[in-house]
Amino acid sequence: MSSEAAPQQPVPANKNPEWYSRCCTDLSKVKPSGGRIDGMKAVLTRASWLWENGRTITVGFVLPVPGTPVQQAKVQEVVKEWEKYANLKFRFIPNGNDAEIRISFDDTGSWSWVGTVALSIPKPTQTMNFGWVDSNPGIADEERGVILHEFGHAIGYMHEHQSPRRGEKLTLNEQVIINYTQETQGWTEEETRQNIINVYSRAEVSNFSAVDFTSIMMYFMPASWNVQGIDIPPNESLSPLDKSYAFLNYPFFIGTASSDPDVNIQNALNAAGVTGAARANIALEYIEGDWRGLRAEFTRWAVNQRALSDRAQAVSKREEAAPAVASMAEVEAA
């Protein structure tokens, strides 16, 4: 799939169930990775797309629809939430054409380039779009959710529903999803697999948790889309893991404290569930003020957690198959 995939086109209201207006609203853009998924769009991150820790990122509003003062103010207000947990600053500048993150409000969809990939997009082309942030007074929950989600992509987060560990909790009804997106979006089976069904390979992400259904990066999903019958509601605020991973990828070191006193290394490690030697190693990198080393140790822990999970699943499958194998052996021996 092209890295310049077109935003979703509107479909007739009578084609969509009630939940669809809040589902599949963004097409996050990434450059082809050459891996199993060239990809579109957790808590998932890819190290090469993360910004340098402590960086100030310039943001502005650009054509084709730079937005009204009300729309712009909503974005400026909501992004402060990410600044509490990630040691990054978003500085909005008057001339949006010169900004590193360039936002428009075209009503064709909501999307964002992922992390530092935005730096490779020629100016003044937009790097983020909000299709459902309006000019009405006040910030609606849905607007807060989409702004947090797209800025999650902008700081390097990928989609949670495509986590390499999705299979631990969720098995998708693939044909149901393929049929639906073909009817309403005109997507091919391959497009649906890339956008929704396929998981990222471990080579494409650097650190990731067990799937977090409450993550701001999780797709809203109706129960009919998965075997477990789990109805995943829209998430409109940051989950504890979103906050934890933001801190561990962009840590506030001594002298650069967050505006929230509860945001610290201990709470971040607790929320992520990091224990033992990995916790000690991450804490040491933090004490030494080495954010690159901290990211590396955090990634090492995440990869090890995936290995442990894979091993546990393999043992479980062998145990489930044991009775059948024993029965077969008895038949062959008779």
Image: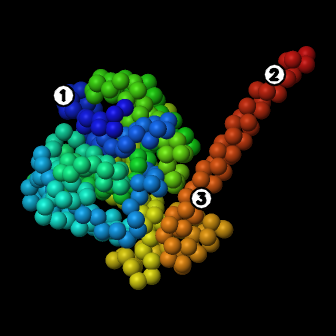
Q: Residues within 10 Å of mark 1 (few under 14, many from 20)?
A: few
Q: Residue at x 34, y 34 (%)?
A: 2
CA neighbours of label 3 inside 10 A, class few (<14), some (14 to 19), many (20+):
some
Q: Which of these two is toward me, 158 or 275?
A: 158
**Residue at x 76%, y 26% (from the top left corner):** 324
Vertical relation: 7 (above or below) 139:
above
Height in image: 91 above or below 42?
below
Image quadrant occupied by the C terminus: top right
* Residue nearer the viewer, 20 or 31: 31
**Element type at mark 3:** helix
Compared with 265, 46 (above or below) is above
The residue beneath circle 1 is: 12
Residue drawn at the location 14% of the way across and 52% of the way down: 62
The answer to which of marks 2 and 3 sits earlier in the sequence is 3
Specify the amino acid type for callout 1.
Answer: Pro
* Label 2: element kind: helix
What's the image's color scheme? Answer: rainbow
116 lies left or right of 202: left
Q: Which one is in front, 262 or 73?
A: 73
Q: CA distance from mark 2 to mark 1?
A: 54 Å
Foreground residue among 249 and 180: 249
Identify the residue under disc 3.
Answer: 300
Q: Which residue is mark 2?
A: 328
C-alpha distance separating marks 3 and 1: 47 Å
The residue at 36%/44% (across/down) is 30
In the picture provided, is 269 more to the left or to the right than 135?
Answer: right
Q: Which tag is nearer the camera, tag 3 or tag 1?
A: 3
Whether residue 172 appears in this view of the structure is yes
Give the percent coordinates (x, y) of residue 258.
37, 76
Residue 6 spot, x, y in % from top left = 26, 35
